[in-house]
Image (cartoon, rainbow, N blue to C red):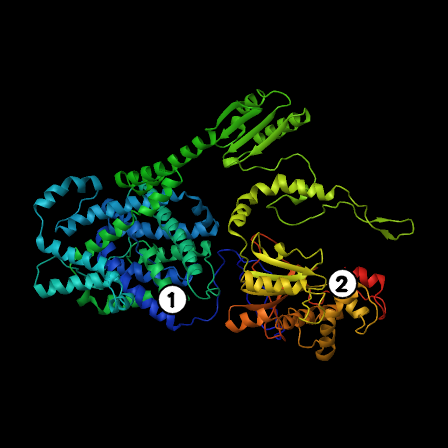
Amino acid sequence: MTASTSTINPRDTADLSPPSREQEPHGPPGGGRFRISGADLSASIAVFLISLPLSLGIALATGAPLQAGLVAAACGGLVAGRLGGSPLQVSGPAAGLTVVTADLIIQYGWRTTCAITVLAGFAQIGLAALRVARSALAVSPAIVHGMLAGIGITIAVAQVHIVLGGTPDSSVVDNLRALPAQLAAVRPEAVLVSALTLGLLLTWPRLPGRGARLAKILPAPLVAVAGATAAAQLSGMALPRVDLPSWSSHALAGFPTGPVTGLITAVVAVTLVTSVQSLLGAVAVDKLVSARPGDDSHIPRSNLDRELVGQGAANVVSGTLGGLPVSGVAVRSSANVAAGAVSRASTMLHGLWVIVAALLLVPVLDLIPLAALASLVAAVGVQMVSLNHIRTVTRHREIAVYVVTTLGVVLFGVLEGVALGIAVAVAVALHRLTRTRITHREWDGGHHIRVRGQLTFLAVPRLSRALHQVERGSRVVVELDGSFMDHAAYEALQDWQTTHTTQGGEVEVTGRAGTRIAEPTATAHTCCRPWTPWRNHHCGDHPASLLPGGDARPAPVRVHELADGLGAFQRDTAPHVRGELARLAREGQRPAQLFLTCSDSRLVTSMITASGPGDLFTVRNVGNLVPVPGTESADDSVAAAIEYAVDVLKVRSITVCGHSGCGAMQALLNAPPPTGGEAVTPLGRWLRHGLPSLERLGAEGSSWATLKGRPPADAVERLCLVNVVQQLEHLRAHEAVVRRLAEGTLQLQGMYFHVGEAQAYLLTPSLDLFDRVVASPAPGASHGEPAADAPSSGAAAAGPAPGRITEEATRAAR
């Protein structure tokens, strides 16, 4: 069993439990004063060094002014970084927008393309106001991956012409047709620069030894472009280079001109691609942050609607200032997370560095050969065709959707390719939903009916025909080899099953690979079915009845209750655990913990520890007591279990768990057993092992013990807590425990479980502090916090006066 808990100092009265207000999984980032940490500063520089060459390369690939890439990078960093809902996502010109933007520039010109970018930004803000951001995540991943693959192929094919020293055409087909002629007129110096760029790009991250540390500081795109530029400059190659015109002549957005239908289609295309790519990127960034080593719990998860607002605002500003469309960029975002960024300050600083470079480094940027940028962008395009994505969609039988989307983007354009992919995805889903195969065969002594595919109302007539071929009173196995069954099919199957069993037949409904499914008919212990929430547990459905005088009397004993439970286990639970138990039977038990707790029937160890077979070596006794070795020779059972667990099973930890309302502690308080030779019952002799806890309580009091900032509710709860600490001390008197503690291979820990609050507390090993266990609540559950002054439950109420152990105290101890 693996459990993750953390402790806090109980002396602090502040409640550090999770907030009662539920936070959205992609809730808005926290506000507060803008601060810059050292981690954000270093991360912003790393992202800037990647962003600068990529922004220029993407602008080159689209045919836009090269300065437009820098404008988009700055707007993405400053505007989207400040207003967006994903603190660590870096926005800017993305390779996924290259094909769309290039088509718009060819069809409408640069100034109208900028206006389309502005309109797309307003459309994104409108979508955010409608709170539809999460609907974009409903798009099939096969469509998204196919769209990116198609864009990557288009980019790579176009950039090959620049790598060879030529000029690309507007479509993939034209570029492929012109490739033989381009190969005949290749420029060797352009190929050399491109080869050097690609060589540095591929080998730089793989440098061994000290070079690996340098590779972590300087990103490969920057090194590749800088190395190729230096080589071209030193060798005196005559190559086309970056030409950044004066900012005074930079073209801004103009009034859109062209057919209204075409402009609307263009706005929809830009909005669709930028929004989907940004939202998927925000979700991916959340996963990267959660997987990053260290405590990043202070970094809020992405608010997708707010992220749309930030991306829309960035597109409005970028388009107005003559920049490319903006969206979240996976390469820069992953670099930002990997560099250790902790807030949106890193994204915004990266945008500031881009502005500084655009104003002060123009002479340096003008030295970059276009072939180096083209090979860099071509490499990015090739990487967009991910073999891992292809394997994933193949495994999920969606390769047709992927291929059609990719080919549609390559041959017709992004919007058309996505539309074709959606159409194929819908067709595949309908085909799966309607394609149901039902076979019926007879075997020795029964019938076997197999349903392959989704069982919906469309398949009910065929299912009914197969079921009615079964003779009355026979044994039937119905195998459902699918992942979905609608209400109509469920009712048809259940009605037939009820009728068939009433007529003396036997029905077994199984899932895939023969896994048995619990019958829907009413049986004993229906509330205790396996793998359902442990709630409303009333198997003994006989509450205490009242005598005429109003006194309660015990519920009647059910003779067959144990047999009913065994039958429910064999029928419902055993099929699920048989494989695991068979493995444990072969390999033997290897528990990690010895769990010593009370015999109280309300304490379900597997429930409160989320453990299963083979996880815990459990010892239960009245009062969770650990007798000191040598005190009474008749009490060797606990010592034997400790010795076996520590020396033979080699457990790594021992946990002593007490609980609220413990009857044994109530008995110790109300009627402590005599320590002399006075005759006492077996229970009294056993409770003598708890007398040191009673003495400790009288000596130390309980001012040091708090539970969630409150003192114990009463004397019983105080003694329950002190008793756990005392039994941990008794454990240290066992030779096996002392030896393993000295070796550093064993840990002792105390635990307290409040039954009424369903709340666990972890006791620190210092023996004088109690810390709250911070447990992660189950998703979708409602978790009310227990009241600070809640009294202990169960038998914690005041009992009879001190003296001998009375019948009431004995019953409480049991």
Q: Residue at x 38, y 70 (%)?
A: 39
Q: What residue would you read off at disc 1?
A: 340
Q: Position of residue 434 (x, y in %)?
A: 47, 29
Does the rendering let one see residue 657? Answer: no
* Foreground tag (1 vs 2): 2
- State the CA–CA distance, disc 1 to disc 2: 53 Å
Q: Residue, x 67% and y 40% (percent of image)?
A: 567
Question: Hey, which quadrant is residue 522 in on the image?
Answer: top right
Residue sitting at x 60%, y 53%? 781
- Kindly identify the amino acid type of the residue bearing the numbered disc 2: Gly
Kind of residue at badge 1: Gly
Secondary structure category for the residue under label 2: helix
Q: Which residue is mark 2?
A: 663
- Mark 2 crowdedness (10 Å alpha carbons): few <14, some 14-19, many ≥20: many
Q: Earlier in the sequence, mark 1 or mark 2?
A: 1
What secondary structure is found at the residue carrying circle 1? loop
